Amino acid sequence: AQDAPNDAIRSLLRDRERIDRYLHDQMRGEVDSSCRGLAFFACSGGGFFEVFRSNVEFRDQLVVDDQPHLKQLGVLADEYERLLLVMLDSSRGRVYELRLAGVEERVNVIEDVPSYHKAGGWSQPRFQRHVTEHREQHYKEIAAVVEGLTDRGRLKNVVIAGQPEVVAEFSRFLPKRVLEKVFVTIRIDITEPEDTVMRKVIEHLQRHEHFKENLGVREAVKQASIGGKGAV
């Protein structure tokens, strides 16, 4: 740093001050603090300051260079940029597009599915068929939404979240080409606060990615240990 031009040093110091001020404002609640990762791109000398907010945590990193360092953003974008999240129970459904920079709610489906205690004068078998028909129609509507968004948006991955029996029943209404894009299902209760549910989903996805990475490493070690072609 001692050999760097004075204007470059002054620019770096101003960058640090501006980043510190932003973080201080976030701690005071003056800017949205719901994200889990922040990437700062700053050059006070060039009049440039951008903050990239992410739902996914970044690895702590400081880079001083004349070009923006985008490796972490590129890796995470590959994993999370094209992902559709479906959260549902037997009477409600929410469909989100998960982006690295945020979560966009695309569709909110609420179906007035009768509950079993509302049978009234109906015979039990007849009312049960009525409830089943309503529930299946609810799943069909959500499946149609997911199918349309998947086809139009060319989304590569789909995540389904809900209680296991609901996820299993709903999956019957998805066409094969969509089912092939479902890479994980998650057990959650969608009546929990939305930010809590989203946090669980993101954490589960991160664990899923780490599991796949570790599995690949273990397989490479196994192949190498038995004289295979695995590279470690």
Image (cartoon, helix red, strand yellow):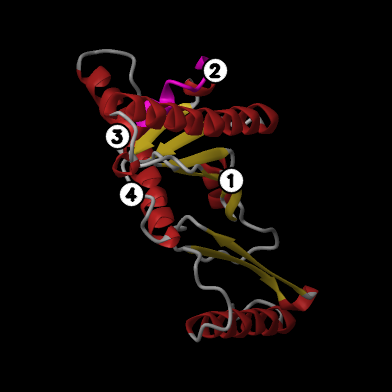
The kind of residue tagged 2 is Arg
Kindly indicate whether the residue at mark 4 contacts the one at mark 3 (C-beta within 8 angstroms).
no
Q: Which residue is mark 3?
A: 164
Q: Quadrant of the N terminus?
A: bottom right
Q: Residue at x 54, y 39 (%)?
A: 83
Q: CA distance from mark 1 to mark 3?
A: 33 Å
Q: Nearer the viewer, residue 18 or 85?
A: 85
Query: For numbered disc 3, what is the local secondary structure?
Result: helix
- The CA distance from mark 3 to mark 2 is 21 Å
| Residue wearing tag 4 | 189
Task: Give the structural element (helix, strand or loop) at label 2.
Answer: helix
Q: Where residue 177 sits in the image (x, y, percent)?
A: 54, 17
Horizontal side, residue 103 vs residue 212: left or right: right
Q: What secondary structure predominates along the stretch shown in magenta?
A: helix
Can residue 232 be seen in this snapshot? no
Magenta span of residues: 167-176
Secondary structure under badge 4? loop
Give the percent coordinates (x, y) of residue 9: 66, 81
Q: Is residue 156 above or below residue 52?
A: above
Instruction: Name the kind of residue labelled 3 in the image.
Output: Pro
Q: Which residue is mark 1?
A: 74
